[in-house]
Image: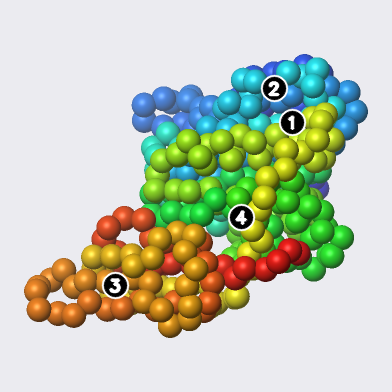
Amino acid sequence: MTDTQLDSPIVATVPFDKDGIHHGFLRLPYSRDDSAWGSIMIPLTVVRNGEGPTALLTGGNHGDEYEGPVALFGLAQELDPLDVSGCVIIVPAMNYPAFRAATRTSPIDRGNMNRIFPGRPDGTVTEKIADYFQRVLLPMCDIVLDFHSGGKTLDFIPFAAAHVLPDPVQEEKCFSAVKAFGAPYSLKMVEIDSRGMFDTAIEEMGKVFVTTELGGGGTVSARTAEIARQGVRNVLRHVGILAGEVVTSPTQWLDMPGDESFVFAEQDGLLEMCVDLEASVKKGQTIARIHTIDRTGVAPTRILAPCDGILIARHFPGLIKMGDCVASFGVVIEDL
Ligand SMILES: [Zn+2]
């Protein structure tokens, strides 16, 4: 850190460099009407034992996505430090104000954690959290697993993913970790806009990074919770932090054909999906209809598949607004 950079106002209440398991908080001072000297207390567990790599495991980057928090609150309870070689830093609900409000973004500043990196030490609450991850937690880590799912407005097939990167060695390490995660689908992911993402901050630091999309709709299913639980342990085994072999499961690899992967609504209305998640579609096939809701007697607008592929994501609520993402598609590939 240079002299011109401010220290983060966030303080960890447990050590990162002591062996054992430590449950505590990232404490962020937040002075407000109902608590003059109050703080936001972001749950944190640090498990360290001897020599080995450091993994950072995060959920609740978006506050209405639950597979990550379910898997990580569970892991923090279940991990025995004697089974660990190295260090595991667990933050089950990164954007904690958003998680408590069950909203994608923070109710305090509307901050979207995954669009706000590198953050600012003297910024809004969400910017301060991002800055702490950027300058304190990420430099400690060798690998980061950040859980996402669709939240209240999207639903996804369950997949782990990494991005195509300029450094082929780093990219290979990321995709090996995706394979180890062992979700039913594994994706070479394309972002609509990667600027400000946690993903991008991690990758630019040269770290190994795995993300997921595991369902959605603002809840968690038994199937996706189990995928998350097994996936996080597999990644820890893969990097040697936990002993034992990765529990292998068959995975279908998918690629995303750039901008053709997404379809957006050009009107408000009532959404009727004509195919469900995991369905194979052909380019030009009707995958959804949007019914006009202002009056009767108007034919619905047909939404067509932009490419051959698999339906990997869909708008979740029954009503849709102009500009919403209706659906997203992946193309089957044999392997990497
Ligand atoms: Zn998310």
Task: From this view, report whether residue 229 is shown above or below residue 251.
Answer: above
Residue 21 or 140: which is nearer the viewer?
A: 21
Circle 3 SS class? strand
Task: From this view, report whether residue 32 is shown above or below residue 259.
Answer: above
Please name the residue that numbered disc 1 is placed on. 88
Q: Residue at x 63, y 48 (%)?
A: 183
Residue 131 or 306: which is nearer the viewer?
A: 306
Three-letter code for the amino acid on which mark 2 is drawn: Leu
Please name the residue that numbered disc 2 is placed on. 79
Please name the residue that numbered disc 3 is placed on. 289
Circle 4 SS class? strand
Circle 1 SS class? strand
Is 10 left, or right, of 297 in this rendering?
A: right
Sequence-wise, which precedes: disc 1 or disc 2? 2
Circle 2 SS class? loop
The answer to whether the residues at label 4 and label 1 have Cβ atoms under 8 Å apart is no
Camera-near label (2 vs 3) is 3
Q: Quadrant of residue 91 in the image?
A: top right
